[in-house]
Amino acid sequence: MDACANVLPRLTQLEIAMTTTLEWLGTATSRLTIGDLVIFLDAYMDRVPSAPPVGLRTADVTRADYILVGHSHFDHLAGAEVIAQNTGARIIASNESCRVMRERGVPQEQLLASQGGERHRLAGGVTVRVFPSLHACTWVMTDSGCGEEEHGHTGLTQDERAAVPGGLVQRITEFVGRGGEEAQLIMQHIPASAGSMNDGGPLVFLVESPEASIFYQDTSGCWTGVLSQLRADTAILAASARANLDGEPIQGSMSGFIAMEAKLLDAKKVILGHHDNWMPPITSGDFDVLPVRTQLARDAPGAALLEARYLEPVALSS
Ligand SMILES: [Zn+2]
């Protein structure tokens, strides 16, 4: 028999085995499938009733191997306990996220507490590296807009930041204080959802397989010194609130921030997260992707913006 006849089917099998797809599940949550391996990136799908449904609830997830959680707030961590308990998936997340998961009944042996610097093997040929990151500046919700202009609020200490009016917590508190059914539902939803008031120390992840490298970030903050050392075929980048650039609120636009990150990572594909209407009416979901596309074309022309829709698989294999 021709030797090639034996080799080719095996190559095809390997190719199929490593096919990589991403399904966005709203907020900063996605399901990443690499061959047979199922990885959730964050786990928040069970949202307030006023948010558009993402097409999948955590209780309906029957297969998962790992859950990578970027930080401990409820809109990222909640649901990981359900998936972990129903599927046996292991959670890779900060110490704070793991503490919350333990309190919600996830067995210790399913928790891989990480703080940056770790490399975990997820399957044969597939690993994830963990790096420290930063949370978006929710203490100042000034819209970054589309321009290059300065927005201020730099050089402040933590107590000075706490005194800045109009932060996200204040916005939610005022909304809930006004009363009404929607406010009541949000007031019930937040404490019922697994999460922490602390972000727990945000993490970013680099999933690497022979077919693809995927950078995952779930809140708009980055250490440029970290990103400049990494390369990723695909960058999943959060686009929400005032971006945090090396510890200071960005002076300029969200689209400029995203393009800068894509350039540092040398990404070929960019997929946005956290830009949908995940908690109306506090969030609006009217994020305009056009400035991001324009800025990428200008600053990171090698990076294409892929627009993901809930539960629609996006192919990431190169
Ligand atoms: Zn957060």
Image (tube, grey):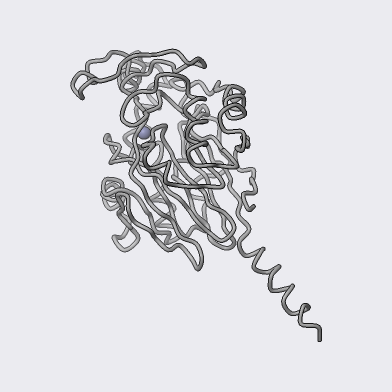
Residue 299 vs residue 88, the one in the foreground: 299
Give the number of callouts. Answer: 0
Residue 75 vs residue 120, the one in the foreground: 120
Query: Which residue is outermost to the right?
Result: 1
Which quadrant would residue 288 be assigned to in this image? top right
**Residue 259 image point, x, y percent:** 52, 30
- Residue placed at 48% from the left, 31% from the top? 260
Query: Which residue is outermost to the bottom?
Result: 1
**Residue 11 image point, x, y percent:** 69, 70
Q: Is residue 97 above or below residue 74?
A: below
- Residue placed at 35% from the left, 17% from the top? 171
- Residue placed at 25% from the left, 20% from the top? 155
Q: Is residue 92 above or below residue 47?
A: below
Look at the image and tell me whether residue 309 can be seen. Answer: no
**Residue 51 image point, x, y percent:** 51, 29
Quadrant where the image shows the N terminus: bottom right
Query: Which residue is outermost to the left?
Result: 159
Q: Is residue 29 above or below residue 295?
A: below
**Residue 303 shown left or right of residue 70 in the figure:** right
Report the image quarter containing ligand 1. Answer: top left
Which quadrant would residue 70 be assigned to in this image? top left
**Residue 103 image point, x, y percent:** 26, 50
Q: Is residue 167 above or below residue 38?
A: above
- Residue placed at 20% from the left, 18% from the top? 160
Look at the image and tell me whether residue 146 can be seen. Answer: yes
Which quadrant would residue 43 be assigned to in this image? top left
